[in-house]
């Protein structure tokens, strides 16, 4: 017999207190996606991490996170969303301590991967509990707006917190911030969160669990390693094609299962598919941009880690303001227009950044670009998430939340991998030319070009002219990445507008 321990008569005040706990959990998980970005120069200097290693420090968290989200959502549906989320929180706290104490790049990447595993059991449960608690469509849309604002603001808030900690402590301190927040969330969750599950007797789709984990993990791993292996290499193409074949097998298994981990037929619902796609595009652009902009602030503008973090504050503020507004606008005029315009605004912000110079005024050009991007993300997040969750029955909200979050993580991972690869390739070519022109031996120049920190240090030792040339190489590479992301956002906007046509995501 289906069970649902959520009491429908729960008061409005109780529901919003529950939302507060869920938002704390979201903050904890999402902030760790970006808090490391401001520490990347510190990792490059103190751990001697290459550009490739820096990408792995960021994406090492995303790999298991994305690969296991569907598993985490399915387990939450069956075993109970509250206990699965609480177990994930405990694991996240423990692995955060491991990351803080890491003394090598390899150890840090391993700790980040363990954190990603824990996060995969937290994130889908938050959205599933929210959907079960807020049953009124209008109230749920507003709650998802707050949830989305927390998620979006956390992305930009991470560098601020990280910069503040790095100003006074060692690089590992960016992970210790998880302890007080995690313990508080764990205690409040134990007291306030209701438990809900689909069925106490419904069996777990073990084949679906294994096949989805293998397919998604393999796909994300191949995407991350693509820049290193080469996008046209046999390993990359074989990994992506093999993973896609496994995911096709997952679809076939789920279609035949009497108790599927995910009813894949939901992808026939246009608002579900459109919501997942728009989230993926938005976070592709966002994660790639955040990965590069913190390096721009520190390496090119010479900001401290704290100042670099504070410089992302306009993004956080604008996201927090616009996201709930996006939910309200979607209820009135439909998500088709709101989401499409949001992606175009994101593209406009990236285009502005694509023309930014190394000495551009912060309070005009850079803030303008970040506010446009943040407004775009705010218009995309809540309507898209609401479109996904409103498409699902109660027994699929956990797995559906996992799908939404998986597309977010895959989009973000692609953003760091693809835009990071474009940046690294363009920077290496121009940096080698700049350094060899300054008299640096070609083999030394090529070795240094794999790290922005090393290339700038070598250029500084060579001459002021070489230093300027390497800075110009950085900006040219940044522009190439921004224009690429802007193109992806424009294409995504057009795709959403066509997919939804006369339909509303929240109708």
Image: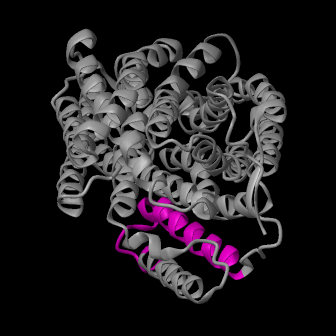
Determine the residue positioned at 46% across, 63% down: 223
Kindly indicate the quadrant of the structure image that contains residue 339. top left
For this rendering, which residue is in front, 318 or 356? Answer: 318
Count of numbered circles on the image: 0
Q: Is residue 41 left or right of residue 20?
A: left
Q: Is residue 229 magenta?
A: yes
Q: Give x and y (percent) for residue 483.
A: 20, 44
Residue in the foreground of this view, choosing between 382 and 318: 382
Q: Which image quarter holds the N terminus?
A: bottom right
Furthest-front residue in view? Answer: 9
Residue at the (33%, 41%) spot, across then down: 380
> Hey, which quadrant is residue 291 in on the image?
top left
Q: Residue at x 18, y 58 (%)?
A: 502
Q: Nearer the viewer, residue 363 or 452?
A: 363
Q: Position of residue 307 (x, y in %)?
A: 46, 12
- Residue 392 image point, x, y percent: 50, 61
Can residue 413 be seen at all in this image of the molecule? no
In magenta stretch: residue 213: yes
Magenta segment, principal secondary structure?
helix
> Where is 129 relative to 464, above or below?
below
Res. 388 visible in picture: yes
**Viewer-closest of 505 and 124:** 505
In the image, which residues are magenta? 207-236
Asked which colour scheme the image uses, the reply is one colour
Which residue is painted at 71% across and 46% down in the image? 115
Residue 497: x and y, percent?
18, 55
Question: Left of 56 or right of it: where is 129?
Answer: right
In this view, 281 is above or below 452: below
Q: On the rendered structure, is 347 left or right of 112?
A: left
């Amino acid at each position: 017999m289906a069970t649902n321990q959520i009491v429908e008569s729960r008061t409005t005040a109780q529901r919003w207190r529950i939302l507060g706990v869920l938002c704390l959990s979201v903050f904890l998980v999402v902030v760790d996606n970006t808090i490391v970005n401001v520490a990347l120069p510190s990792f490059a200097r103190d751990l001697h991490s290459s550009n490739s290693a820096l990408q792995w420090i960021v994406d090492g968290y995303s790999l298991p996170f994305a690969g296991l989200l569907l598993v985490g959502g399915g387990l939450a549906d069956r075993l109970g969303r509250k206990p699965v989320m609480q177990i994930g929180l405990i694991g996240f706290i423990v692995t955060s301590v491991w990351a803080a104490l890491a003394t090598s790049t390899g150890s840090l990447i391993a700790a980040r991967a363990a954190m990603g595993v824990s996060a995969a059991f937290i994130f889908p449960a938050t959205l599933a509990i929210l959907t079960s608690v807020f049953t009124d469509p209008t109230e749920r849309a507003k709650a998802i707006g707050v949830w989305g604002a927390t998620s979006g603001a956390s992305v930009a808030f991470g560098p601020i917190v990280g910069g503040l900690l790095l100003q006074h402590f060692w690089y590992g301190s960016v992970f210790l911030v998880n302890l007080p927040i995690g313990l508080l969330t764990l205690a409040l969750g134990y007291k306030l969160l209701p438990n809900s599950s689909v069925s106490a007797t419904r069996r777990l789709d073990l084949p679906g669990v294994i096949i989805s984990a293998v397919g998604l993990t393999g796909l994300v791993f191949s995407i991350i390693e693509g820049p290193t292996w080469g996008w046209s290499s046999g390993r990359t193409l074989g990994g992506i094609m093999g993973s896609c074949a496994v995911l096709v097998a997952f679809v076939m298994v789920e279609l035949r299962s009497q108790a599927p981990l995910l009813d894949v037929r939901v992808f026939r619902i246009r608002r579900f598919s459109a919501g997942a796609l728009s989230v993926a595009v938005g976070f592709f652009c966002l994660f790639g941009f955040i990965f590069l902009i913190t390096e721009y602030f520190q390496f090119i503008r010479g900001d401290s880690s704290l100042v670099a973090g504070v410089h992302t504050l306009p993004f956080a503020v604008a996201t927090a303001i616009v996201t709930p507004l996006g939910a309200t606008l979607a209820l009135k005029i439909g998500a088709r227009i709101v989401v499409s315009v949001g992606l175009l605004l994101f593209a406009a912000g990236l285009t502005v950044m694509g023309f930014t110079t190394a000495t551009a005024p912060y309070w005009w050009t850079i803030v303008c670009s970040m506010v446009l991007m943040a407004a775009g993300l705010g218009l995309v997040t809540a309507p898209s998430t609401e479109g996904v969750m409103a498409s699902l029955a109660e027994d699929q909200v956990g797995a559906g939340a996992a799908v939404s979050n998986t597309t977010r993580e895959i989009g973000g991972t692609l953003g760091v991998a693809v835009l990071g690869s474009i940046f690294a390739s363009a920077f290496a070519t121009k940096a080698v030319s700049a350094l060899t022109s300054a008299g640096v031996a070609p083999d030394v120049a090529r070795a240094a070009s794999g790290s922005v920190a090393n290339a700038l240090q070598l250029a500084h030792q060579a001459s002021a002219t070489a230093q300027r040339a390497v800075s110009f190489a950085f900006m040219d590479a940044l522009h190439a990445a921004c224009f690429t992301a802007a193109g992806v956002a424009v294409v995504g906007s057009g795709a959403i507008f066509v997919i939804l046509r006369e339909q509303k995501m929240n109708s």
